[in-house]
Image (cartoon, grey):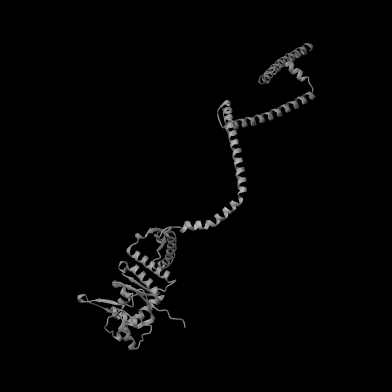
């Protein structure tokens, strides 16, 4: 049993020796792995010395290690900050020259700065001397400023109208008068042809036309057609009459020709404008050979061409007024028509007048408004002489607007 126990213990010793050898090999390997990064000598003897120390020493060393780590972290942050500052400084460096070159340039700039300071001192001395002279001459300066202020309005006036022939002042007055005239003319042009507006070119007496239908495009007056030029000229004439009416009453307006270049729509517009002038109490005389205007002009004086260069004057409708008065219709409120010298049968006139009144009443009931004289004559089937006689017979019951007829409004009782 003792031998068996000895063998068993010998086997345990051998196993422990094997384990001890393995542990020592693992320890050597761990020591090599520990000391290789640091590059410090560390063996089993040094490990035994450290293992022999107590916990107080270990705590002290741990605190010292923590302090070293904190110091390392702070030093690392400072290093990074200084490195960034250095990089920024190098990036913002104004020159790539060497230090000797920069020092030489600085010496040159210092010399220039010294010269500039000397000039500054000289200029400051000159300013001081000038201030002293100004103080001495302050009374003269005040008197000079007073006279300069008094002369300023005369200088501006001389700049505006100070020409020997008066051309500047005359141009100012002409431009001002033309602006007033254009104001009156545009007011008339709005009624005649609202498409256009007259404007004056700045600092001149030339006119341009503003086309409202073309986004207020400014055009030359020479680009107007014949009919448009007539309407613009008519608006200027009416504006001139309105301008002169401030001092002189202009009650008559005579227009010589110009209607032949108008299309039917423009002719209707022009005649409506003339009718409005007539309703304002002005006498409008039109000299024209356009046959389409005979329906729109109630009062006419005709020059009839004869043979051998002879001619005579007719006033259509004069005898018709007299006949209407004799029949009993009365001359009050009647307007002379365009008829020949032959009298018109009173019965036919009464019939046509009744038919004409019925047509106008039907048109007003249907909301059609004024009806053209040509359409009414076509519906009645009568000639111009009989139609005008019927219109005269109706008197104030009908209202003539251009070349159209409508019922006159009934006055309120």
Whole-percent x and y of residue 78?
67, 30
Whole-percent x and y of residue 286?
33, 73
Say which of 8 and 413 sits in front.
413
Is residue 375 positioned above or below 96 on the image?
Answer: below
Residue at (60%, 35%) from the top-left corner?
118
Residue at (55%, 56%) from the top-left corner?
149
Q: Quadrant of the N terminus?
A: top right
Say which of 166 and 413 sits in front.
166
Q: In which image quadrant can residue 361 be found?
A: bottom left
Image-based side of 132 in relation to 368, left or right: right
Say which of 176 and 236 sits in front.
176
Image-based side of 250 in relation to 34, left or right: left
Q: In which image quadrant can residue 300 be found?
A: bottom left
Q: Is residue 114 visible?
A: yes
Is residue 155 positioned above or below 312 on the image?
Answer: above
Say which of 338 and 229 sits in front.
229
């Amino acid at each position: 049993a003792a031998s068996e126990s000895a063998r068993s213990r010998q086997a345990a010793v051998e196993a422990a020796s094997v384990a001890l050898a393995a542990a020592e090999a693992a320890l050597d390997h761990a020591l090599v792995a520990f000391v290789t990064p640091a590059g410090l000598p560390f063996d089993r003897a040094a490990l035994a010395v450290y293992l022999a120390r107590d916990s107080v020493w270990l705590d002290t060393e741990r605190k010292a290690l923590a302090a070293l780590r904190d110091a390392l972290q702070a030093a690392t942050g400072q290093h990074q900050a200084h490195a960034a500052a250095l990089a920024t400084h190098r990036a913002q460096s104004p020159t790539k020259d060497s230090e000797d070159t920069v020092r030489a340039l600085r010496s040159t700039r210092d010399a220039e700065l010294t010269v500039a300071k000397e000039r500054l001192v000289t200029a400051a001395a000159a300013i001081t001397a000038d201030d002293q002279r100004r103080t001495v001459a302050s009374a003269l300066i005040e008197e000079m400023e007073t006279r300069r202020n008094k002369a300023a309005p005369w200088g501006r006036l001389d700049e505006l109208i100070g020409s020997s022939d008066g051309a500047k002042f005359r141009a100012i007055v002409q431009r001002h008068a033309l602006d007033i005239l254009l104001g009156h003319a545009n007011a008339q042009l709005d009624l005649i042809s609202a498409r256009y507006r007259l404007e004056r070119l700045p600092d001149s007496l030339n006119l341009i036309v503003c086309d409202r239908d073309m986004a207020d495009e400014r055009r030359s007056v020479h680009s107007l057609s014949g009919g448009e030029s007539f309407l613009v000229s008519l608006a200027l004439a009416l504006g001139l009459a309105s301008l002169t009416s401030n001092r002189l009453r202009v009650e008559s307006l005579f227009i010589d020709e110009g209607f032949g270049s108008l299309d039917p729509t423009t002719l209707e517009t022009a005649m409506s404008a003339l009718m409005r002038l007539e309703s304002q109490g002005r006498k409008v005389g039109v000299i024209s050979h356009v046959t389409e205007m005979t329906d729109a002009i109630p009062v006419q004086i005709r020059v009839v061409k004869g043979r051998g260069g002879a001619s005579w004057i007719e006033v259509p409708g004069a005898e018709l007024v007299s006949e209407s008065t004799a029949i009993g219709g009365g001359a009050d409120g009647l307007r002379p028509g365009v008829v020949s010298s032959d009298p018109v049968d009173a019965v036919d006139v009464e019939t046509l007048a009744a038919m004409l009144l019925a047509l106008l009443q039907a048109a007003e009931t249907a909301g059609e408004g004024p009806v053209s004289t040509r359409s009414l004559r076509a519906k009645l089937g009568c000639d111009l002489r009989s139609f005008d006689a019927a219109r005269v017979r109706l008197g104030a019951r009908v209202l003539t607007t251009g070349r159209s007829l409508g019922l006159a409004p009934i006055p309120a009782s």
